[in-house]
Image (cartoon, helix red, strand yellow):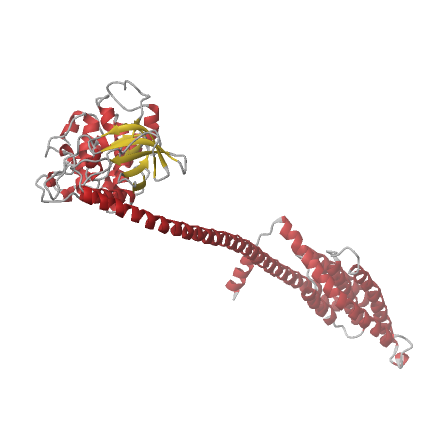
Amino acid sequence: MIEALRERLRSLREVELDEAQQLQFLDEEAALNVRRLKVILPAMILLNLGHLFLLHPDSPGYWELGPDYTAWAHALLVVHALTALGALLPLALTYLPKQPVSWVGPLGALVYQLHAAAVAGVDQMNSGTVAPYVGYALVNVVVVAMRPVQAMVVFGVSTLAFFAALQTFQPDEALRMVVRPTGPSVAVPAICIAWFLYAGRRQAFYFRETIARQRAELAELNSHLQERVNEQVAALVGRAEEVERLNEQLRARVQDRSKELAKALKRLAQHGEFASEVGGEGRVLAGRFELGKELGAGGMGVVHAATDLRSGSQVAVKLMRGMGAVSPAAVARFLREVETAASVTHPAIVRMIHVDVTADGTLFQVQERVEGYTLSTWLTRVEQLDTGVAVRALEVLCDALSTAHAAGVVHRDVKPANIMLTAEAPGLKLLDFGIAKAALSEQPAMTMTATGGFVGTPAYMAPELWDGSTDAAVASDVYAVGVTAVRILTGAIPRLGGGAEALAEVAVPDALRELVDRALHHDPAQRPCAAEIRDQCAAIAEAEGYQALDAAVSAGVLGVAREISDGTATHLSFG
């Protein structure tokens, strides 16, 4: 019981109100007292007036009760009269225009506690009881909301009045000594009870305000969330409608272009050749791509700079031209490879924009145009790449490959010639997926196919691909990454089966040397995946403080042997 009371008192003391909350709480306390006194004080004044009527000398039988009774009744009449007059002051204050008055409640309590002290003193003339004093104290402390300091004033003053009343109306010193402790015995508990009730009301106010504030915050949060949800729903509905419109347009275009492609492929199957003239500066393909200058040509095709008339962006267009070595089956295979490359989206992979065939049978594909140099071009002008650039390049390259591998795409021809450094983030572009390179290159990459050809560049091909018994897989790309790493760090191609032994002659982090050695492992199952190489290269770069790849390319911090002769040259992707 005592421990529970202590815990309760501790919880009451822990409530903290800021200045604004304290003022609001006190205003509420005063307003509560005003409401109560407007009801209680008129009733008490009427009660006082009733006593005046009963105790008036003109009342029946008043003079027949003896001189002692008449003296007591007269004194009591005076007390009630004074109390009725005194109660008019706090009652009047409750009706002031400016409300609330913070001391109006304690003032009303003080009036009637003084009344109780006077009645207790007068009663010493007749019965010697102090019960009115105790009763009024209990009622006042419960009915009137008082702060501890107000309670101390009310009960302190009334205790002094109680002592004065005893001294005035109780002639017997012995009885005065017996009754006198009643004053403080009532005042102290009353003050404690007033403080306890005050602390409880203060805690209830704190909890109420906290709940109200939290409800307001929750309502505001719900309102914001509802607004966001409504905005997102509206955006989603708008996007869904836009997507539906685009899908309708796309379906119509696909149907139209499918018919044109079918006709063109039928002509190819019948005649086994393409149109003799595929290029031509100023020619517009598919009503959208205007050809510019020729960027390069191979035995199987030609690459033009072009402008997308729809968006105004600069693109690169590859066109196939007629050669008997290219069959309709190769065309179909080419289209499948283009579709595969287009299915991979990554900032380090050249974006496929469009593939189509003209009415005269010219097959073409459109890709983003990238300015920069391939790694093979850099390596003709520097002995080897700076280690930091090489690590960052491997990180970006393997990030792109991990995305392609996750989409089920194997590049099959990872090598410096298919890796372009560019000043635009992320600083690198991976070019030429699959046989697209073999179909257009002046020097076709060797390919091992069902007909006995090779897919890939021999120096970068994994050991398991040489006998043709195993198809290219993600581990084959990882092996090519290992060869590329040795090539750009040392300037040499690693010996088959030699792992990363060539890196022993160059100053590179041990973690990088171990990583490259694992990538060149003869067992595909022992090689790390592209994502692991990416993560480890990122960790090495962070530990060594290597700058981002695009920043290094922009700054020209690339080679470690000699400067590039023409830093302003531009290489446009043929891939």
* Residue lying at 41% horizontally and 38% vertically, measured from the top left: 310
In the rendered image, the vertical position of residue 207 relative to residue 76, given as above or below:
above
Q: Nearer the viewer, residue 76 or 429?
A: 429
In the depicted structure, whether residue 406 falls above or below residue 187: above
Residue 5 in view = yes
Residue 574 drawn at (x, y percent): 27, 32
Query: Residue 43, percent across and down?
Result: 78, 71
Task: Give the residue at x 15% y 38%.
Answer: 455
> Relative to 501, is 49 on the left or the right?
right
Would residue 333 be seen by someone viewing this image from the given angle? no
The answer to whether residue 99 is left or right of residue 373 is right
Residue at the left extreme, as displayed: 467
Q: Is residue 266 left or right of residue 46?
A: left
> Residue 65's quadrant in the figure?
bottom right
In the displayed image of the protein, which residue is found farthest to the right?
Answer: 58
Indicate the quadrant where residue 95 lies: bottom right
Give the position of the C terminus as an image quadrant: top left
Q: Quadrant of residue 115?
A: bottom right
Q: Closer to the camera, 162 or 407? A: 407
Residue 48 placed where, x, y %?
82, 71
Q: Position of residue 188 (x, y in %)?
A: 66, 61
Task: Count numbered badges in the picture.
Answer: 0
Q: Nearer the viewer, residue 352 or 209?
A: 352
Q: Nearer the viewer, residue 472 or 520?
A: 472
